[in-house]
Amino acid sequence: MPPMAYQSEETDWGATVAGLGARRPVAVITGATSGIGAAFADQLAARGCDLLITGRRSGPLEERRRSFAELHGVEVKAVPCELSNRSGREPLLRAIGSLGRVDWLINNAGHGRGVAFSEDECSGQLGLVGVHVEAVLELTHCALTKMPAGGRIITVSSLAGFGVSPRSGVYCAAKAFATSFSESLALELKPRGIRAVALLPGFTHTDFHRYEATAKRNRGLVRWMQPDHVARSGLRAADRGQVVCIPGLANLMLYALVKLLPRRAVYRIMAGGTSSVLQATERGSADRSAH
Ligand SMILES: NC(=O)c1ccc[n+]([C@@H]2O[C@H](COP(=O)([O-])OP(=O)(O)OC[C@H]3O[C@@H](n4cnc5c(N)ncnc54)[C@H](OP(=O)(O)O)[C@@H]3O)[C@@H](O)[C@H]2O)c1
């Protein structure tokens, strides 16, 4: 049995999460203030789950909490927290430690930096490891102490985990960790009747890209998806017992392209950043339609 070290003496977390799971399954979703996390929260509440949701911005998080509860008639609690460091994660770990059960864990929270590794503060790059690696590991460990057979863990990784990038090296590496960890977890937890899914979206219309100058339009194999579609694919994958889910046909083709091309060709394409990926995939899809 995993250790039960996630309860607190100081705050009454039992009171904070009171009511969750009394009559319905409980879903814990990180990063539910916007994008893919908000879509997961909406869809799991529609399936009849009580929610424990997190985000950094307490105002929008509270608005989400209220609207999910009103719309779906379920219990929703919110814990604002910063997941990139241990002390920031503490409130959420303790809240989860005070729950009676966790039926769904959606490891979704995350951000990029958009700054090359050598040009950024090291603390900023370490923060990426904190939110995409350490938080995933620690929250999963904590939630598993409360997860019955039938539980589901979805970790939102990325197609970027198969790629490389001159400006997002740590992000790509962290997502490679997330995918690999989730796959191994799926094997480890199968005898307990718990499923783990690595969800690997490609470009998705969310707040993630709000500071990027890149035009958010379809080009070649790059097909922007809506967060609702991505979340629905993740839930369907969990229902079916899929270990890795790449939502959308174009993303599957992008994945195949990265796997099939010699690594040197991948480096050449990625060296120019997102715009050269768009050009290369455009050439790829034009070549295919010519045959
Ligand atoms: N959008 C894409 O194209 C894409 C593609 C592949 C994978 N992904 C992955 O999808 C996941 C969700 O991102 P999204 O696209 O839905 O972006 P989003 O709309 O920006 O949502 C990100 C969520 O994570 C929270 N968050 C970010 N950094 C955090 C931190 N350090 N501590 C605590 N919470 C944090 C945000 O909270 P606040 O808003 O309150 O700050 C927000 O709720 C991420 O893991 C991302 O890497 C996205």
Image (cartoon, grey):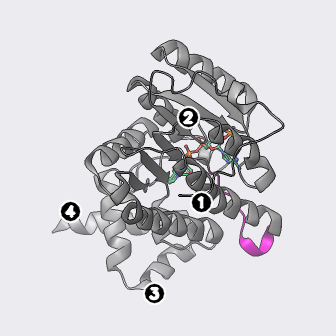
- Circle number at residue 264: 3
Specify which label sits upstream in the sequence, 3 or 4.
Answer: 3
Q: Which quarter of the figure has residue 49? A: top left
Q: Answer with mark 2 or mark 3, whichever residue precedes in sequence.
A: 2
Question: Which residue is denoted by mark 2 in the rendering?
Answer: 100
Does residue 87 belong to the magenta stretch? no
Q: How many angstroms separate mark 2 from mark 3 (CA)? A: 51 Å
- C-alpha span from label 4 to label 1: 43 Å
The part of the chain drawn in magenta is 110-121
Q: What is the CA distance from the residue labelled 3 to the residue labelled 4?
A: 25 Å
Q: Position of residue 176 (x, y in %)?
A: 51, 69
Q: Where in the figure is residue 254, as x and y percent of width and height?
A: 36, 64
Dot 1 falls on a residue whose secondary structure is helix
Mark found first going from the N terminus, 4 or 2? 2
Towards the viewer: 123 or 92: 92
Kindly identify the amino acid type of the residue bearing the numbered disc 1: Leu
Q: Point out the tag, 1 or 3, that comes first from the N-terminus.
A: 1
Number of the front mark, 2 or 3: 2
Q: Are marks 1 and 2 in contact (CB under 8 Å)?
A: no
Return the disc, 1 or 2, that comes first in the chain's sequence: 2
Q: Does residue 57 appear to the left or right of 31 in the view shown?
A: right
Q: Position of residue 81 (x, y in %)?
A: 74, 41
Q: CA distance from mark 4 to mark 2?
A: 55 Å
Residue visible at 45% across and 39% down in the picture: 103
Q: Nearer the viewer, residue 102 or 8?
A: 8
**Local crowd size for mark 1, using a 10 Å CA cut-off: few (<14), some (14–19), many (≥20):** some
Q: What separation in Å lies between label 1 and label 3 (alpha carbons)?
A: 32 Å
Question: Residue 41: where, in percent of width, then height?
Answer: 50, 32
Amino acid type indicated by mark 3: Arg
